[in-house]
Image (cartoon, rainbow, N blue to C red):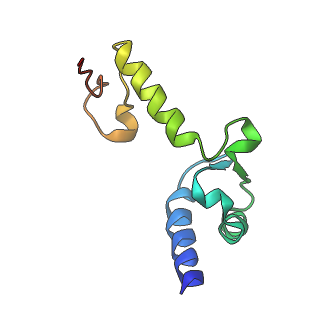
Amino acid sequence: MQATLVDLTIQSIAQVLNQLPMQRLLVCGGGVHNPLLITRLNQVLAPCPVESTEDHGIDPDWVEACCFAWLAQQRLQQKPGNLPQVTGARQPLILGGVYMS
């Protein structure tokens, strides 16, 4: 059952990513600790290398926290936190709110 779920995950990822021009895929989060997932991603995305964000100086278990810290920084500096070309938003927007207690 788990092998089937891994294959479904791999095929879902590959179906989308094979449509994009990629130089490499950086993997983070829990999936980076799954050797079968990484091996299969390397196989189906070849010749595109699949690498851990650790190889680029960011602990794969910290990426989500880094993203939220960046979003908070953007909000505090009154800067947009979205990319309309990625999110489909009509324009760049300042995201979130600051509530003082």
Residue drawn at point x = 28 percent, y = 28 percent: 96
Residue 16, position in %: x, y? Answer: 49, 60
Q: Is residue 88 above or below residue 15?
A: above
Residue 31, position in %: x, y? Answer: 60, 60
Q: Residue furthest bottom?
A: 1
Instruction: Answer with the quarter of the image where residue 42 lies.
Output: bottom right
Instruction: Answer with the quarter of the image where residue 58 lies.
Output: top right
Can the viewer see residue 79?
no
- Near-viewer residue (57 or 16): 57
- Residue 81 lies left or right of residue 48; in this view the side is left
Can the viewer see residue 74?
yes
Residue drawn at point x = 39 percent, y = 31 percent: 83
Q: Residue furthest top?
A: 77
Quarter holding the C terminus is top left
- Residue 56 lies left or right of residue 22; in this view the side is right
Residue drawn at point x = 60 percent, y = 48 percent: 21
Q: Is residue 88 above or below residue 29?
A: above
Q: Is residue 67 above or below residue 13?
A: above
Residue 98, position in %: x, y? Answer: 27, 21
- Near-viewer residue (4 or 61): 61
Residue 49, position in %: x, y? Answer: 74, 53
Q: Is residue 38 above or below residue 20?
A: below
Residue drawn at point x = 68 percent, y = 70 percent: 40
- Residue 81 lies left or right of residue 17; in this view the side is left
Q: Residue furthest front?
A: 101
Say how many tags the image has: 0
